[in-house]
Amino acid sequence: MNAQQFETLVGRFPRLRIALVGDFFLDRYFEIDPGLAETSIETGLPVHNVVRVRSQPGAAGTVLSNLVALGAGQVHAVGFCGEDGEGYELRRALQQRPGVVLDRFITTAERHTPVYGKPLVVTPGEEPRELSRLDQKNWTPTPLALQQALAVHVRELPGQVDAFIVLEQVDQQWTGVVCPPVLAALAEVQAQYPRTVVIADSRRGLTHFPPVTLKMNAHELAHMLGYGSTSLEVAKTHAQELASRNGHPVFVTLAEHGILGANPGVHAVHVPAFPVRGAIDVVGAGDSVTATLACALAAGAGLQEAMELAMAASSIVVHQLGTTGTASPAQIRDLLGV
C-alpha cells in the first residue's frame, strides 16, 4: 500500500457510520502492589492490596474503542447492560468515547452486566502480570422480549450506517445479544442491503450465522469445516471454499503467521504479520482486526488493503501491555512506513 492509497482510505473513516451489535463487557483492572502484601489474620491466606481500579469497555466494547481510535465518525452500539453498578460504569465509559451513539443500548433489570475482573500485579520496572480472572456472566437465556427489542434495533439501522459488526462473546448459547431474532434481523439486513458490509465474529463458531462476511481463526475454520490441518495452504483452500459457498468474504487470522482472506470465486490472499518488537499481550488483537477490516471495507478497500491495515493495527495493539489496546491511523501509518 502506498501513501496515496492509505490517505484516501483513512480519509474516509471520519465519514463512516458503524453499527456494533454484540456482547458488551466491562473490563475491570485491579492493580495490585506486591510491596503491600499481607496475610489475613482470619484465614491465613495471602491478601493482595489493590491500589488502583480502572475500568474500560470490553468484548464488543474493545471493538468500539478500536473504531473510535481509527476515527470512525459514528458508532451505534446495539446491546445491553444491567441496572447495576457495573452497568453504570460501562455506560459511562461508552459515553466518554467520541461519536458513540447509545440510543439502542438497553439498560435492563433482567440481566446483569458481564464483567471481566482482571487482577494485575504491578511491580515497578517489570511488565504487569495478570492473575486468574474473576468473571461475571449471564448463564440463563436472554429473555425473549429483550431479544426481540434488540432485533428491532438492528432493523432500524440499515440506511443509517455503512457497516455492521457483530460480535458474540458469550460461550453459552443464546445468553447474550446474538440470539435467533437478532440473527434473523441481520439476515434480512444483508439480503435487503447486499452492498452493506456485515462482518461477524463469534467465540462459539459461526455455523449458526446467516450468510455474511465471516472472520475467524484457523482452528475455528478447521472445526467449522471438519478438517484437521491448520496449515496455510489448507486454510487457503477451505477459506476460498467457504467464501464461495457463503457468497461473502471470509477472513482467517493465523496468529504470528498473519491473516488470509477470500472473496467468492477468487483465490485466497495471504498477508503476513509484522515481526514482534518486544514483549506482547495478545488480548484485544482480534478485536482490532475486526474493527480495522470493517472500517477499511466500508471505506472501499480491497481485500489485500484491508488486511494490510488490519495486520498493522493488531501489531500495534499486541505491544500494549496490561490493557486492551487500540491503534490510531497515525500509528498505523508509521508502522507501514507510508
Image (cartoon, rainbow, N blue to C red):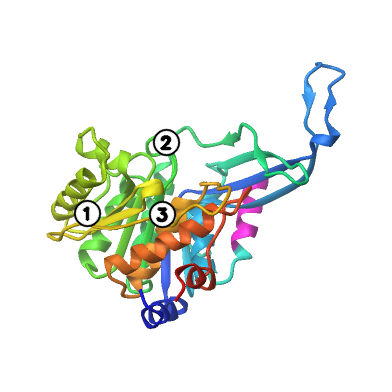
Res. 273 image quadrant? bottom left
- The reply to whether callout 3 and callout 2 are in contact (CB within 8 Å) is no
10 Å crowding of disc 2: few (<14), some (14-19), many (20+): some
Q: Position of residue 172 (x, y in %)?
A: 41, 34
Sequence-first disc among 3 and 2: 3
10 Å crowding of disc 1: few (<14), some (14-19), many (20+): many
What distance separates the C-alpha of mark 3 from that of mark 1?
A: 20 Å
Q: Amino acid at mark 1?
A: Pro
What distance separates the C-alpha of mark 2 from that of mark 1?
A: 21 Å
Q: Amino acid at mark 3?
A: Leu
* Dot 2: element: loop
Q: Is residue 166 above or below residue 228?
A: below
The quadrant of the rendering that contains the N terminus is bottom left
What distance separates the C-alpha of mark 3 from that of mark 2?
A: 19 Å
The residue stretch that appears in magenta: 82-94
- The reply to whether callout 3 and callout 1 are in contact (CB within 8 Å) is no
Q: Amino acid at mark 2?
A: Asp
Question: Is residue 115 toward the left or the right of residue 217 in the image?
Answer: right
Q: Is residue 227 above or below residue 181?
A: above
Q: Which mark is drawn over residue 150?
A: 3
Q: Nearer the viewer, residue 156 or 318?
A: 318
Tell me, yes or no, if residue 159 can be seen here: yes
Mark 2 = which residue? 171
Tell me, yes or no, if residue 83 can be seen here: no
Q: Position of residue 300 (x, y in %)?
A: 31, 75
* Dot 1: element: loop
Q: Residue at x 46, y 33 (%)?
A: 140
Q: Position of residue 15 (x, y in %)?
A: 43, 79
Sequence-first disc among 2 and 1: 2
Q: Residue at x 40, y 77 (%)?
A: 6
